[in-house]
Image (cartoon, coloured by chain):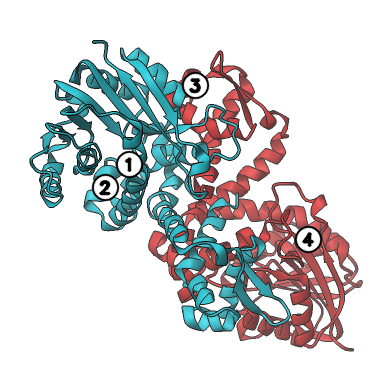
Chain colours: A red, B cyan
């Protein structure tokens, strides 16, 4: 019940600059903080109650002076990452979840439609709406930068392979593939909607990989280009319900040469849904159904394994990232699944 | 971080009728539930993950059949009360808290202004907007019905007293006062904004207390009618910051005859803000500052005591309701403070 109020109370203390003020000058009063933040001391006092309760901030009741408590020990880089995530949740999710029931019924984002007059998915809306794009893209770039090295460290890309990055957006995955798996003859093709082409080609040029990377425009549900040794599907399957995931996996199967390998990067639910230290089922159902797609959501690793088999693959590797290696504020727990098309 | 998503995921399972379906027919599958709710089975499965995690609902993984778990043991009346509160939070707070930082800076409800084009407080907006009014009034009527008997059981109203109910809205408090404290000559006056008069007088007639109750229109900040033996201030002081509370208390002091009594009903924060079983500081700061007033919020009982003394009163009674007597879903913990004007 108190989830939405707690979420914004905490974020607002950062947005008002109260935490930065206390980091710079420990021992400020509500009056000092109010003057700096442009808000009434009464309001500062009210909003800091929660942070005192949570031991984030300490209050000396005899003097009315605040200092950072647990927040003093959090490195700025960790704080920045958590705040990027919180800002994304605020901008993308907080208002949209109001419409969750309608979105669940219609399979369309009633929130985007009402709030932005946009009919489609979040991935389309970010192209048109700067506030959504900035909060979303900043987060996704952070996530990709953190997770791609692990993904490419976990998979094998044979020398000289022809690689297809399905739903590869504007080419960042292709660039990472080339840079991290470089070999003579290695070529990576980004496959995504035609409107991504221009930016992808620019990115290839900017990273000096234009000779080794190319772009094919199209829609995965109309068929996937064929004749590849390796197909990558990163951050994509979790956007779809089972029927769509199977269509994509069958398309990937057809895209591979016999003996070729598919590698998937996807967040997964824990095998034991009741795992209390894992917050994926707390977040992703509302997020995908209410805020990004009107459908979809991650599955357990074991479910993806069975769907890969259903699509004709032989699963050769399924590794879920050890949650203890993730920063404590990270919600998604990613898995790599590798599968082979019979040779 | 996951607060807003968890909140709406849970509420949405009720709104979609999934819980009612499972109560009526235990053992339904996601496909059965989807057919009944008009949503895809994939969506049902995603949204029920959280309820399985929380042991609200049980899933037999071998058959894919759901049954109510902990929710089976919750009496319908408890569930209805909790859902009334959740619905109020959804309609009044969930979207408005997005604008909390701006509301904190300006002292005005940026959310109401943006979402409803309404400039003012929630209490004004409910008069114009049916969705706000229904979710808000349903809750407040429930709260008043539950808490008024305790309030009137705790205070003393001398026989034949002239009573003033400050900010008495449309007369319900006056009616309760007369009915619960009936004595020859007892007269209760509701004092509130002039636009409440008509409905208040109608309510007095409908309850057969028109002879014993009357209405005076006005604004507490322009002065409070004088010459009373007892002044009541219920559900009102928590809406204001310190300066306004002191103005109201001084007005109440002036309204009383020497020796008269003031009785306050107000939610309070726990004396130990870190009390982990108490959710008042988790909810009310965002709620008052971001969603209802642009200011205000409860205080500790000890703070209200000191403010009463600052306004010239002698405090004669301060009782906080025992939280263990409240239903587990109730957030506000109410207190009664009684104070005397020197005779």
Mark 1 or 3, closer to the camera: 1
Q: Chain of mark 4?
A: A
The reply to whether dot 1 and dot 3 touch (C-beta < 8 Å) is: no
Q: Is residue A109 visible?
A: no
Measuring from the top left, give residue A275's x and y in whole percent.
Answer: 74, 59
User: Do discs 2 and 1 share a chain?
Assistant: yes
Residue B300: x %, y % from top left: 47, 27
Horizontal side of A157 relative to B226 (left or right) equals: right
Q: Chain of mark 3?
A: A
Left or right of B176 on screen, residue A109: right
Dot 3: within a 10 Å radius of its alpha carbon, few (fewer than 14), some, or many (20 or more) residues? many
The residues bearing labels 2 and 1 have C-alpha atoms spaced at a distance of 25 Å
Dots 1 and 3 on the same chain: no
Chain assignment, label 2: B
Q: Quadrant of residue A172?
A: bottom right
| Residue A176 disc label | 4
Label 4's element?
A: helix
Residue B125: mark in rendering: 2
Q: Label 2 vs label 3: CA separation?
A: 30 Å
User: Judging from the image, what secondary structure is the residue with disc 3 in?
Assistant: helix
Residue B73, which numbered label?
A: none
Residue at the spot of label 1: B148
Dot 2 alpha-carbon crowd within 10 angstroms: few under 14, some 14 to 19, many 20 or more: some
* Dots 2 and 3 on the same chain: no
Residue shown at 60%/74% (left/top)?
B67
Q: CA distance from mark 2 to mark 4?
A: 53 Å
């Amino acid at each position: 019940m108190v989830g939405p109020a707690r979420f914004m109370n905490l974020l607002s203390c950062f947005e008002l600059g109260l935490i930065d003020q206390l980091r710079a000058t420990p021992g400020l009063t509500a009056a000092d903080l109010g003057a700096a933040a442009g808000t009434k001391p009464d309001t500062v006092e009210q909003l800091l109650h929660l942070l005192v309760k949570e031991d984030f901030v300490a209050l000396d009741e005899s003097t009315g002076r605040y200092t950072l408590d647990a927040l003093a020990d959090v490195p700025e880089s960790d704080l920045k990452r958590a705040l990027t995530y919180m800002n994304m949740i605020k901008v993308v999710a907080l208002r949209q979840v109001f419409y969750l029931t309608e979105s669940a019924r219609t399979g369309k984002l009633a929130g985007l439609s009402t709030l932005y007059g946009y009919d489609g998915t979040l991935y389309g809306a970010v192209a048109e709406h700067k506030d959504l794009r900035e909060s979303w893209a900043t987060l996704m770039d952070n996530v990709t930068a953190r997770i791609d090295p692990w993904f490419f460290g976990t998979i094998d890309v044979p020398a000289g392979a022809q690689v297809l990055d399905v739903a590869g957006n504007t080419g960042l995955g292709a660039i990472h593939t080339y840079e991290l798996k470089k070999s003579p003859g290695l070529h990576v093709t980004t496959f995504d909607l035609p409107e991504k082409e221009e930016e992808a080609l620019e990115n290839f040029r900017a990273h000096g990989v234009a000779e080794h990377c190319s772009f094919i425009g199209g829609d995965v549900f109309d068929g996937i280009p064929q004749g590849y040794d390796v197909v990558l599907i990163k951050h994509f399957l979790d956007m779809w319900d089972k029927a769509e995931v199977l269509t994509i996996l069958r398309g990937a199967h057809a895209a591979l040469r016999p003996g070729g390998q598919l590698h998937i990067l996807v967040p997964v639910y824990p095998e034991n849904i009741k795992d209390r230290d894992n917050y994926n089922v707390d977040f992703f159902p509302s997020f995908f159904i209410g805020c990004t797609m009107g459908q979809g959501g991650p599955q357990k690793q074991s479910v993806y394994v069975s769907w890969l088999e259903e699509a004709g693959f032989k699963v050769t590797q399924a590794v879920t990232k050890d949650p203890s290696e993730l920063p404590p504020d990270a919600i998604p727990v990613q898995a790599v699944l590798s599968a082979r098309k019979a040779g």
